[in-house]
Image (spheres, helix red, strand yellow):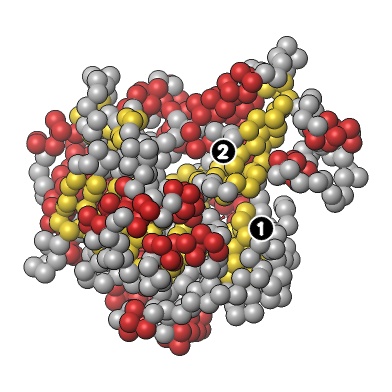
Amino acid sequence: MSEPTIESVLHEARLFQPPADFSQQAHIKSLEDYQKLYDKAKANPEAFWAELAEQELHWFQKWDTVLDWQPPFAKWFVNGKINISYNCLDRHLTPERRDKAALIWEGEPGDSRTFTYAQLHEEVCRFANGLKQLGIHKGDRVGIYMPMIPEAAIAMLACARIGAIHTVVFGGFSAEALRDRMVDGKVKLVVTADGGWRKDAIVPLKEQVNKALADPATASVEKVLVVQRTQQATEMQADRDVWWHELEPTLSADCPAEPMDSEDVLFILYTSGSTGKPKGVVHTTGGYNLYTHITTQWIFDLQATDVYWCTADVGWITGHSYIVYGPLSNGATSLMYEGAPRPSNPGCFWDVIEKHKVTIFYTAPTAIRTFIKMGEDLPKARDLSSLRLLGTVGEPINPEAWMWYHRVIGGERCPIVDTWWQTETGGILITPLPGAIPTKPGSATCPFPGILADVVDLDGDTVGNNEGGYLAVRYPWPGMMRTVYGDPDRFRRTYWEHIPPKDGHYTYFAGDGARRDEDGYFWIMGRVDDVINVAGHRLGTMEIESALVSHPAVAEAAVVGKPDELKGQDIVAFVTLEGSFSPTEALGKELKQHVVKEIGAIARPGEIRFADALPKTRSGKIMRRLLRGLAAGEEISGDTSTLEDRGVLDRLREGT
Ligand code: PRX
């Protein structure tokens, strides 16, 4: 485990008060109100969550126990019956809300669709009936490998409606990565599209599905439901593949939501860890619904007329919680965009804001840094005056990028919520509440009410103010993951044993370094394990290493992150070759391409460095700390006495 470093933002002292007019009409209006909520939740978390659950959600049957905590396994709202699709759709079919836009969608080529709550409800019911017709029952797993089109959200809600468990795989993952997830999740049906638009090109998703399913290990997959989007020729397998547009006209739009147990699994989402293959993070229904609902409402300060846009992909947790479930559970208007800034339209984000009068905009620091590079003229040429709140997520935001976002996009009037959370946490845990908490550029500020966050050492003791430590949570919360799919031991080891339990009290270990300042503000320093964050995408170094060593030329590989101005981190791979291969530029390119094939373009190493050996300890462990230093071009200092062959380091430094 590496030590968190705290230098970069140690001296940031600017403070931005919530604008008075914003606070006046906000859900949480002042620091005092926040403090009251926080204290109330801390004094009796179960009562706090129960009150919100009762007030904010529809239950078919009330729970009898709020929390059953058998560390590290939690059950929330035990024996409650609920359906998140019902909470996102049916209960908004009131005369006032049924004709409100639920989903506004913009396609990359410029096509656009809007679904009112009544229309979205109908589409979801039809899709759910389609799933049933194709043999899907409660508890079955459905893979969703989709571009950013409305049917991705519709498929998720349709699964939730009938109690099928969805597992969404980001459309940028390769056929191999898709296959691994389908096998691990024992998926019965895959929802996909012929293709999607990405940066002026078609990503042929169905082709990838065909490749993935050619592997006999995916035999659990019986059907593939294909949405037509890009209309290129697509190979369909007669007994397995079904076009959505052919099935749809045969389906009824009547499909009552299945009352689910609070703890029935809602979805599995794969994410990278420091060891082994990506793990299936399991989220269940009741607690997740409540947590995403209330965090969306308070953190994005949703008001009836807001147009809310989160730029994430539904393939990641941000898309699950803050494009689909959180906003729709609140009856908000959620905007979904297929495209990304691209050579043919670098200002497309600002066009979307201007066109739809977006009021809340939530994106990633890496996107903001890219906008900075593209210059102020692009956003300044558009009318962004509809914006009233900005958010960021996915990686630490450097104060300069924060200031640019505040000044150029927010016109110095919009509060910024820098939201810290993870796939595992289900929703945002540390964040400003925009009408209440003054912000400091680069700090995610304070824990959400009900979240007992802390910065600790490896004994679990709280460290002093401004000392680096490990980010931890002391008490369960409704949105937390319940387990690793099929591997409860891995769940226990990864999150609950790094910090030894004391007197029966378990502490959640997030894998991030952090410090808390004298005002109690949290500053997140990045991962302390072998997970790297490349342009806001989370990748395990070991996954990339496994991909590299599966190439016949590679004997050994060690992957580290190196600081990158735009992406936050870039991937550097140190590689030793099998005897008959020599280090050439062509081989370097081939290895990068090989990683793309095995995982996806998001994992393409920025740099491959050939070496004759890797620096190891006498017990054979690769010394990544040294490699990280080398990759960053630093002078190697610190203790190298455990290094087995000191010559290795000199040769690596010289670039042999
Ligand atoms: O390192 C933290 C970083 O992203 C990790 C979680 O990645 P993932 O599960 O893919 O979820 C990303 C979206 C929630 C965290 O362990 N991270 C996320 N948000 C922030 C952050 N680091 C600093 N500041 C943030 N606001």
Q: Which mark is residue 384?
A: none
Q: Nearer the viewer, residue 188 or 32?
A: 32
Circle 1 SS class: loop
| Residue 538 relative to residue 324: left or right | right
- Residue at image coords 11%, 39%: 251
Specify few, some or many for label 2: CA neighbours under 10 Å numbering under 14, 14-19, or 20 or more.
some
Q: Is residue 414 above or below residue 227?
A: below
SS label for mark 2: loop
Q: Tell me: residue 248, above or below residue 423.
A: above
Closer to the camera in the image, 196 or 380: 380
Where is residue 536? Give x, y as percent: 50, 49
Q: Quadrant of residue 130?
A: top left
Query: Residue 195, percent across and down?
Result: 30, 31
Labelled disc at residue 497: 1
Q: Is residue 443 left or right of residue 98?
A: right
Foreground residue among 507 and 379:
379
Residue drawn at x 54%, y 61% is 400
Image quadrant where residue 277 sits: top right
For label 1, count other residues whose C-alpha is less than 10 Å away and answer few (under 14), some (14-19) or many (20+).
Answer: some
Give how far across and how far down residue 393 sits, in percent.
47, 58
In the image, what residue type sits under mark 2? Lys
Residue type, numbered disc 1 = Glu
- Label 2 CB sits under 8 Å from any ligand 1 atom: no
Q: Is mark 1 within 8 Å of ligand 1?
A: no
- In the rendered structure, the answer to whether residue 168 lies left or right of residue 251 reads right
- What residue is disc 2 on? 277
Identify the mark nearer the N-term, 1 or 2: 2
Query: Residue at image x 84%, y 39%?
Result: 617
Disc 1 versus disc 2: nearer the observer? 2
Position of the C terminus, as image quadrant, is: top right
**Residue displayed at 15% across by 33% down:** 245
Pinpoint residue 227: horizontal percent, then vertical percent: 23, 34
